[in-house]
Image (spheres, rainbow, N blue to C red):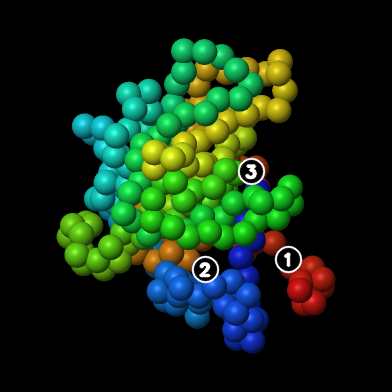
Amino acid sequence: MVQITMFSPSPRALQLNYHFSPSLATNQKLFSRGLVRINTKAWRHSMFLSSKPVLKDGALSIGGKDALTGVPDNVVVTPLTNSSAFVGATSVDESSRLVFKLGVIQDIRLLCLFRFKMWWMIPRVGNSGSDVPVETQMLLLEASKGQDLDDSNETSYILFLPIIDGDFRSSLQGNSSNELEFCVESGDPAIVTSQSLKAVFVNSGNHPFDLIQESMKILEKYTGTFAHRESKQATELTNYI
């Protein structure tokens, strides 16, 4: 899994970035509310939606909205906080690499960060599961206004973060049937499993940047394997990036 480090770019850098990536420019709505708030210290802990992720009747509801439909019976949801949970699945076969279907994503705006090279990630936008590329490290869904989301008409967001589950790393991907899948692999043919119950972390909130930041803090506390950037001292090199 690739760790995501976020920083606040200069206005000039933002202007250059929009010219460089048309796909980002067409989705300024998704980011425009958050660019000026990345470095704020007063995180809004009330930004999380109070509805716990629920798997019922073949639909995974996150923050009061059906994020996935047609969810297979082998998918398992393990609650973590009032707004977040782990999503995993089981298989009848053991392997060092397993691919599980999670359900269908359709007609909802989404943003992916995926590895297109070993050490680099780039964004992709879309509106269905088939738009999610292989090796996606983060998936953000935009729940439209007017939906019944925790009795609120505000736009809300649903976050999927593949994480490390034991000896297995995970990533997201879509298929031609608009199904979201997650892949777990150990990288060693001798290390096999038939299940991964905590492969994907999911959370929901009404502000995308706060949602990502606070979700990373939840995972920092749960895993104890990394430190959030707020507790790290930046090196001098970052002044030149």
Disc 2 on helix, strand or loop? Answer: helix
The location of residue 178, given as percent across then percent down, is: 39, 42
What number is the disc on residue 23? 2
Residue 233 has which mark? 1
User: What residue sits 19% from the left and 65% below the top?
Assistant: 146
| Label 3 Cα crowd, 10 Å radius (few <14 / some 14-19 / many 20+) | some
In the rendered image, residue 92, in percent from the top left (x then y), is placed at 46, 13
The reply, left or right, for residue 109 in relation to residue 172 is left
Q: Residue at x 60, y 44 (%)?
A: 135
> Residue 184 location in percent, x, y?
57, 31
- Report helix, strand or loop for mark 1: loop
Give the foreground label among 1 and 2. 2
Rendered residue at 28%/63% (across/down): 144
Q: Amino acid at mark 2?
A: Ser
Cα–Cα span, label 1 and label 3 = 22 Å
Residue depth check, mark 2 versus mark 3: number of the one nearer the observer: 2
